[in-house]
Image (cartoon, rainbow, N blue to C red):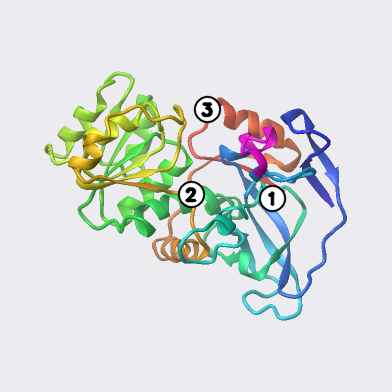
Amino acid sequence: MRVFQIEGEWGMDHLKLSTRAEPQAGPGQVVVKMKASSLNYRDLVVPNRGYGSHTGNLPLIPVSDGVGVVTEIGPGVRRVAVGDRVCPTFFQGWVGGEPDLERLTQSLGGPIDGTMADYMCLSEEGVSKLPAHLSDVEAATLPCAALTAWSALVTCSNTRPGDRVLVQGCGGVALFAVAFAKMLGAHVTVISSSDERIERVRQLGADAAVNYRTTPEWAKATRDITGGRGYDLILELGGEKTLPQSLRCIRPGGTVAMIGILSGSTMATSLGLIITRQVRLQGVTVGHRDGFEAMLRAIDQHRLKPVVDRVFAFEELKEAMSYLQSGAQFGKVCLAH
């Protein structure tokens, strides 16, 4: 079967189209014929061993998100049947409950072989059935970015109607967050560097938006949108350069969901606001299968559709990665197998 794998040495130059033997299902396992994959920024980090020893060993098949159809089940499998359309879960060993080191180190696309293969062999506990209204490409976008947004809004924060939510940027997690927050009845503010993207995200349901290039002190501008109260939840995707302003526009007792570090990974800010306003800093790293399946039920009920920017062919993985790296996309970058 076809696979893309990092082989020989780490580095994007060593990501190559290759072949492996087709897998067979053992007890409790399923074989899935992959139909589509979707890229996340972590997929640009993995080829360069960006997660250190937790990246895995070579050869390694990259990419965490995908969708396929079950073609074989092993003895004892009960959760799915041949013919079911499924997504592999991001963390293969995290079904539910609190995170621990073992659960957080079983992610697809590093250290476990990912979705860029014609077939995958997975535990039946590591796949979930999908809403019928989604295309293969749309469904492939859900395991990482969508679940991260859902975990921030629901699993870790319990967002309620009328809550004020601030979302940073217009990337994959951000666009899912806008959709889910509006579904939950929240008022949503988005900050972005592009007036064009602000207009597009307004069309997706955002209630307010601020261009942080033309308004560098966006904390005051966004806080004014809440009438001075501040936000119940901020999805913090920037990190080093955005967190200080997030702490100035979160409400007392509010939650800052720490998701990304796009602007840097160190923190140089006054910690006093965290203490005096009793702010909760909540790290979010994707989520568990129980949360994923709750999210799928909500997507099915509300017939939500992911935003897909562009679809590449399987053989065009490197081109798709370059396009993602460029930042030109609005929505998810996907591959059809």
Lateral position of residue 60 relative to residue 55, left or right: right
Name above or below for residue 245 compared with residue 142.
above
Mark 1 neighbour class, 10 Å CA radius: few under 14, some 14 to 19, many 20 or more = many
Mark 2 or 1, closer to the camera: 2
Cα distance between the residues tagged 2 and 1: 17 Å
Cα distance between the residues tagged 1 and 3: 25 Å
Write down the residue under mark 2. Answer: 285
Cα distance between the residues tagged 3 and 2: 25 Å
Mark 1 or 3, closer to the camera: 1
Q: In the image, what residue occupies the spot 68% across and 31% down?
A: 319
Write down the residue under mark 3. Answer: 328
Which residues fall within the magenta stretch? 44-53
Lateral position of residue 53 relative to residue 234, left or right: right
Q: In the image, what residue occupies the spot 44% across and 27% down?
A: 263
> Type of residue at label 1?
Gly
User: Which quarter of the picture shows residue 246?
Assistant: top left
Lateral position of residue 40 relative to residue 312, left or right: left
> Type of residue at label 2?
Thr
Disc 2 on helix, strand or loop?
loop
Disc 1 on helix, strand or loop?
loop
In the image, residue 252 lies at what x, y percent?
18, 45
